[in-house]
Amino acid sequence: MSEYVPNLREQLRERVCRAAKEMHASKLVAVTGGNVSARLAAAEFLITPSALPYEQMRPADIVLIDAAGERLDGSLPPSSERRMHLAIYRKRPDIGGIVHTHSPYATALAVAGRRIPALLPEAVIAVGGDVPLAPYARPGTWELGETVAEYLAKRNAVLMEAHGLVAVGANVEAALETAIVVEETARIYWLALQVGTVRELDPAEVKAIIETHEPEIARE
């Protein structure tokens, strides 16, 4: 187990639990859907438990796992999507938090087989460009994790076909903030589709925005 003092581990447990509850309160998930994690050390991670309603979740329920997904500490089983989280952490050593949501508008677009184009500067800053759509892979598998991780190599969010959204960040709070920005962008995109032709930002402008805000965009 890591050399981190217990207080730091418990503080991160509190942050993961708080982010999970905020995710639920923001209507990004329902009942026990979705999951949240944070990197504690190089090979240790804290992740929400499986099948526990967010209203009942406490910091002590957050599970400590190793890089293979094995439980190191905690009384509950870790999220069934822990393999996906671990694959992403391997691909993105720069990030410290991951949020997986079933956000209604973002998930609707994923079910429809649509990416979220680069439409708004604030979304480009949060994500690092558009929000791509990863092809379907069975939930809970390493295959899903490896597929999603590839799409997150140069983005901070990705849609998963017939599944939902994954957002990452320098810490768990940043990951949640990105998930919220993506859901709002997805809502605006859906509304714009009802009006008529949607105008994406020019690729040159997207590139300029990214270059201007590079320090704010946690990506490789």
Image (cartoon, rainbow, N blue to C red):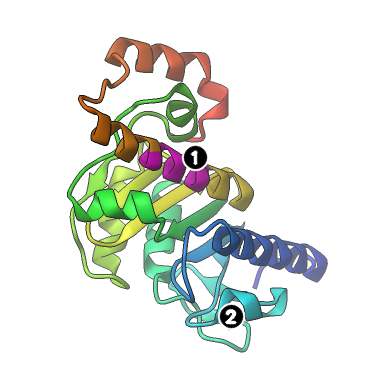
* Foreground of the two, 154 or 188: 188
Residue in the picture at 50% in, 79% down: 78
Question: 103 left or right of 172?
Answer: left
The mark total stands at 2
Residue drawn at x 41%, y 37% is 185
Which residue lies most toward the front here? 195
Write the start and end of the magenta stretch as one range: 178-187
Residue 181: mark in rendering = 1
Q: Residue 180: x, y in percent?
A: 51, 46
Query: In what element is the residue under mark 2?
Result: strand
Residue 72 tag number: 2
Q: Is residue 53 at least partly visible in the picture?
A: yes
Residue 51, horizontal then vertical, whole percent: 48, 82
Amino acid bearing label 2: Leu
Q: Is label 1 in a helix, a strand or a loop?
A: helix
Residue 43 visible in the snapshot: no
Q: Is residue 110 left or right of residue 46?
A: left
Residue type highlighted by circle 1:
Val
